[in-house]
Image: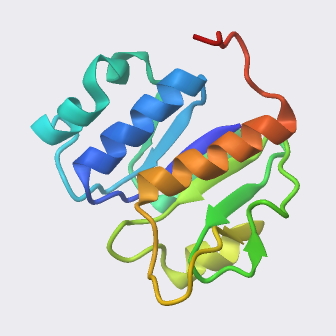
Amino acid sequence: MRLALYQPDIPQNTGTMLRLAACMKVPVDLIEPCGFVLNDKKLKRSGMDYLEQAELLRHSSWNAFLSQRNTKETKGRLVLLSTKADCSYTDFAFGPNDTLMVGQESAGVPEDVYNYADARIIIPMTQGVRSLNVAVSAAMVLGEALRQTASFPELKVL
């Protein structure tokens, strides 16, 4: 299981997702460019000392991410979290090699990225609301994906 962040533009959310990934022992693919400098004070504040524990792989672009992904031995799917999807994340069958991808807070992902994804899932919400915070969405879906795949290696219940 991996978490991919597509061109994030809010450092606090990125720091929160890196902290989440460190706590869950899930590698992160960060697809640049970001809307902030990676050593941003806000990123460090939200990620705290967990940033050093996160397994982070930076990609200079979408194409660089695809090139690296295509050389991997994994057969995992790219699963996009999207407000435009039809399948609820609770109805989706996750696999242990899936990469969960979230888009930019301000714009999601472009159409070519949306179409490239092997699957697109949504978090059902009350009518009349737009979306959840991207870090909250990542936590909800990653938790469900790890639960389904029993992929909680070396985690302790505190």
User: Is residue 50 positioned above or below 61 on the image?
Assistant: above
Residue 106 in the figure: left or right of residue 154: left
**Direction front: furthest residue:** 126
User: Is residue 20 positioned above or below 25 on the image?
Assistant: below
User: Is residue 78 positioned above or below 128 on the image?
Assistant: above
The structure residue drawn at horizontal position 42% and vertical position 34%, both measured from the top left corner, is: 18
The structure residue drawn at horizontal position 54% and vertical position 51%, both measured from the top left corner, is: 138
Residue 154 location, quadrant: top right
Residue 79 in the figure: left or right of residue 56: right
Q: Where is residue 59 in the image (x, y as percent from the top left)?
A: 44, 46
Question: If the image is split into quadrants, where does the C terminus sit?
Answer: top right
Residue 70 can be seen in this image:
no
The structure residue drawn at horizontal position 20% and vertical position 30%, both measured from the top left corner, is: 44
Residue 142 can be seen in this image:
yes
* Viewer-nearest residue: 98 or 13: 13
Residue 49 location, quadrant: top left
Residue 96 location, quadrant: top right
Q: Where is residue 34 in the image (x, y as percent from the top left)?
A: 28, 55
